[in-house]
Amino acid sequence: MKLRSLLFVPGDSERKFAKANGIGADALILDLEDSVAPPRKALARGMVKDLLGGMPHDWAFLVRVNPLGSGLTLGDLAAVVGPGLDGILIPKVSGIQDIELISNYLDALEVAADVTPGHVKLLVVATETPAAMIGFASYATPSHRLVAMTWGAEDLGAALGALANKEANGDWTFPYQMARAQCLFAAGAAGVLPLDTLYADFRDQQGLAESCRIGRRDGFVGRIAIHPDQIATINECFTPSEADLAHARRVVAAFAAQPDAGTLGIDGKMYDMPHLIAAKRALASVGETGTP
C-alpha cells in the first residue's frame, strides 16, 4: 500500500468526498471520529458504507473509526468492513493489545462480508493518550495487519492538560518532540511505515514543504493532510527526485558488482550497509525492486 499522502475527509460530507476524489492522494481517510458530530455518527456510517461500493478509484480507501472505549468502534467496523475497504485507522490506541483486539474483530467481519482474510490493514495514531506514550515497547511484537503508524499532538495535549504544544517559533515543545520520535522508533521496531502528523495551516505551503523536508530527513515516508491543497506538496516532498533515484541505483549496482564487499567507495565517498539499505528503500518507494 503506497502511503505518501493521506487525506482526511468527513464521513458525512458527500461534497468534500467528491472534491477529494481524484485530487492525487495515495489514500483517503473517511472519518467517523472527530470530524463527525455525535448526532450524525449513524448517518456517517451509512454514507461511508455506500461510498465503499461506489466509483472506481486509484487510491486506498481507509476509514477512521471511533476509538475503543467510545462504545462505537465495533458498530463502525461492522458497518464498513466489506469489498472496497483497504484499511482502518485506529485513533487513541494504547499499544499492541488494542491492535490485536481490532484484528480479532476484523477476522470475523471479513468472513461475514466475504472479504479475503487479512485484506483489511490497520494504521494507528500512536501518541494520543498518556498510556500510549509508555506502551511503545509493545510494537516490537509485529501484527500481520499493521502497516503504518502516525502520531498526533492535539488529543495528547488535551489529556495532559497542556496549555500549548508549540514554541513561539513554531517548533514542537519537548513532550511532543518525544511523541514524534517515539512513533518513528516504534514504526521501525514494528517494521511498518512511519507517517508524519498533519500540518494545521493549510494555506502555508512553504511551511508545509519545509516540515515535510525535515520529516523525510528524519525517516518519515509520508504524511496526513487535512486539506486537498496540501496533497501536491506532500507528494512532491516524499517522492525521491530523479537525482536521488539515480544515485540510489548506482549504490545498489556497486554493491551488486562486489557482493563480498561490506564497504566501498563511490565518487570519493565511502558507503556501507546502511547506505545500501537506504538506497533500496528509496527505490522501493517508487516501485523499483532494488535489484540491478
Image (cartoon, helix red, strand yellow):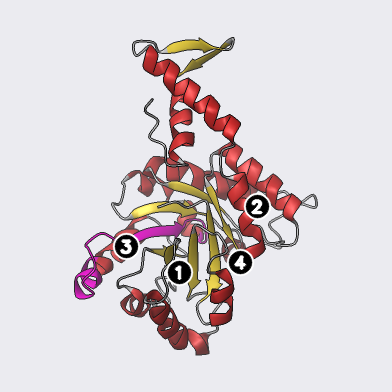
3 and 2 marks in contact (CB < 8 Å) = no
Q: Nearer the viewer, residue 42 or 130?
A: 42
Choose mark 2 or mark 4, whichever is in front: 2
**Distance from Cα at disc 1 to Cα at disc 2:** 23 Å
Question: Looking at the rendered structure, which numbered label has been put on residue 120?
Answer: 3
Looking at the image, tell me whether mark 2 or mark 4 is earlier in sequence order: 4
The residue at the far front in this view is 56
Seen at 54% across and 65% down, the residue is: 22
Residue identified by numbered label 1: 64
Looking at the image, tell me whether mark 3 or mark 4 is earlier in sequence order: 3
Seen at 57% across and 31% down, the residue is: 244
**Distance from Cα at disc 3 to Cα at disc 2:** 28 Å
Residue identified by numbered label 4: 158
Q: Which residue type does callout 4 highlight?
A: Ala
Seen at 34% across and 10% down, the residue is: 260
Question: Looking at the rendered structure, which numbered label has been put on residue 87?
Answer: none
Could you say where residue 78 lies in the image, as x and y percent from the top left?
31, 78
The range drawn in magenta is 107-129
1 and 3 marks in contact (CB < 8 Å) = no
Choose mark 3 or mark 2, whichever is in front: 2
Q: Residues within 10 Å of mark 3 (few under 14, many from 20)?
A: many
Looking at the image, tell me whether mark 1 or mark 2 is earlier in sequence order: 1
Looking at the image, can residue 71 be seen? no
Q: Nearer the viewer, residue 9 or 142?
A: 9
Which element type, helix, strand or loop, lies under badge 2? helix
Q: Which residue type does callout 1 highlight?
A: Arg
Counting the numbered discs, the total is: 4
